């Protein structure tokens, strides 16, 4: 037998093995998320698929669509499509769901949180449970919470040290609440899809943006088009894996438990690598040529006071009782909240 014949035979055997190892009833599901395929969002989604394949014996497979491809780049529309069953899974952030569920803005209220302990107390506690109940009314089953992170401000004009430094800056923002926050600081906010933002920064259409370091600024190479960064920790944004209620109801209890377990493990992993990337991020950004200004506690307090009107406006919109639940949960850890 010639080498060519041996190679052909080997290929046939491999193809047969692959076919016989793949269950006849294997099903492929679609998962959409906001960012590109280099981010921790993508890595979390990939981990979810890996675990689901393993736990289902290959009967479940998740096809991942980054950059909100299935909604034409409209990151706000993904949750709505999952809610009505047009999409199976979504990995999205709280702020991107606010057009559908305004209460989700509670996570991102300016200076609500001081640190990760505060964050974890809410996502793993009663506030997280309450938000899961609210999303369920829109047809979205929250499987697990992950992390986008504390949002830091970047721009190309000058270092941001005080609220006055924000005046007049054209700032790309992700959602309605951030429009009010930027207006309170005297900036000129422009709501824009993330898929359009890099080129807008590159071309000077906007001066700056705000996003987490580990989950977005580094993997999306924002440092290539921005000179200054101020880690002001002014707002936090969690992400979550959600599945459509329609899809969820089609599964038996064993499948539901398997899917939820895979999601929880995947988001634990995603949160871990996001925080690791964030911890080493400032040094990395300095190496890439960004000028970093790290504000003092007094300077942070000035930003907190300047954004208080936006906090109050949105606290009323999402519901005082809901805000109180978050604040009480944070206070239980003996840390001051806004």
Image: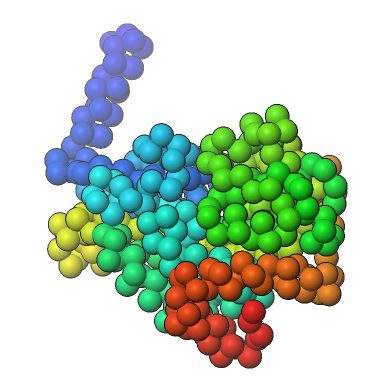
Left or right: 71 as drawn, with respect to 19: right
Residue 223 appears in the figure: no
Instruction: Point out residue 297 in the picture as x, y percentages from the top left corner.
Output: 81, 74
Looking at the image, which is closer to me, 299 or 62? 299
Residue 13 appears in the figure: yes
Left or right: 103 as drawn, with respect to 134: right
Left or right: 273 as drawn, with respect to 280: left
Instruction: Point out residue 133 in the picture as x, y percentages from the top left corner.
Output: 32, 72
The residue depicted at 18 percent of the width and 67 percent of the height is 253
Instruction: Point out residue 178 in the picture as x, y percentages from the top left corner.
Output: 59, 57
Q: Is residue 54 above or below residue 118?
A: above
Looking at the image, which is closer to me, 144 or 52? 144
Left or right: 286 as drawn, with respect to 187: right
The residue depicted at 77 percent of the width and 74 percent of the height is 301
Instruction: Point out residue 55 in the picture as x, y percentages from the top left corner.
Output: 29, 57
Looking at the image, which is closer to me, 316 or 94? 316
Q: Is residue 71 above or below residue 283?
A: above
Q: Is residue 4 above or below residue 276?
A: above
- Quadrant in which the N terminus appears: top left
- Quadrant in which the C terminus appears: bottom right
The residue depicted at 42 percent of the width and 55 percent of the height is 99
Report how many numbered discs are placed on residues in the image.
Answer: 0
The residue depicted at 62 percent of the width and 41 percent of the height is 220
The image quadrant that residue 205 belongs to is top right
Q: How has the structure been colored for display?
A: rainbow
The image quadrant that residue 302 belongs to is bottom right
């Amino acid at each position: 037998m010639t080498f060519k014949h041996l190679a052909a035979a080997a290929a046939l055997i491999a193809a047969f093995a692959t076919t016989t190892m793949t269950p006849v009833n294997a099903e492929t599901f679609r998962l959409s998320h906001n960012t590109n395929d280099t981010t921790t969002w993508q890595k979390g989604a990939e981990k979810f698929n890996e675990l689901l394949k393993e736990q289902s014996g290959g009967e479940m497979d998740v096809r991942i669509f980054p950059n909100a491809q299935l909604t034409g780049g409209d990151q706000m529309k993904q949750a709505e499509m999952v809610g009505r069953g047009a999409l199976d899974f979504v990995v999205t952030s709280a702020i991107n769901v606010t057009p559908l569920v305004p209460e989700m803005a509670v996570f991102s209220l300016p200076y609500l949180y001081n640190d990760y302990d505060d964050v974890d107390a809410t996502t793993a506690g009663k506030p997280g449970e309450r938000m899961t109940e609210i999303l369920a009314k829109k047809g979205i089953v929250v499987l697990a919470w992950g992390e986008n992170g504390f949002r830091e401000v970047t721009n190309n004009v000058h270092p941001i040290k005080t609220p006055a430094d924000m005046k007049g800056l054209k700032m790309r923002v992700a959602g309605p609440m951030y429009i009010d926050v930027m207006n309170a600081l005297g900036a000129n906010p422009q709501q824009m899809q993330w898929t359009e933002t890099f080129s807008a920064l590159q071309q000077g259409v906007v001066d700056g943006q705000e996003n987490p370091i580990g989950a977005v600024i580094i993997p999306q190479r924002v440092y290539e088009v921005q000179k200054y960064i101020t880690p002001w920790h002014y707002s936090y944004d969690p992400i979550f894996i959600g599945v459509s209620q329609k899809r969820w109801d089609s599964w038996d209890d064993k499948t539901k438990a398997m899917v939820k377990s895979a999601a929880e493990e995947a988001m634990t992993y995603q949160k871990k690598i996001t925080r690791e990337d964030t911890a080493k991020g400032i040094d990395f950004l300095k190496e890439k040529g960004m000028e970093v200004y790290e504000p003092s506690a007094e300077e942070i307090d000035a930003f907190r006071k300047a954004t208080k009107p936006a906090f109050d406006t949105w606290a009323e919109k999402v519901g005082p009782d809901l805000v109180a639940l978050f604040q009480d949960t944070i206070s239980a850890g003996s840390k001051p909240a806004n």
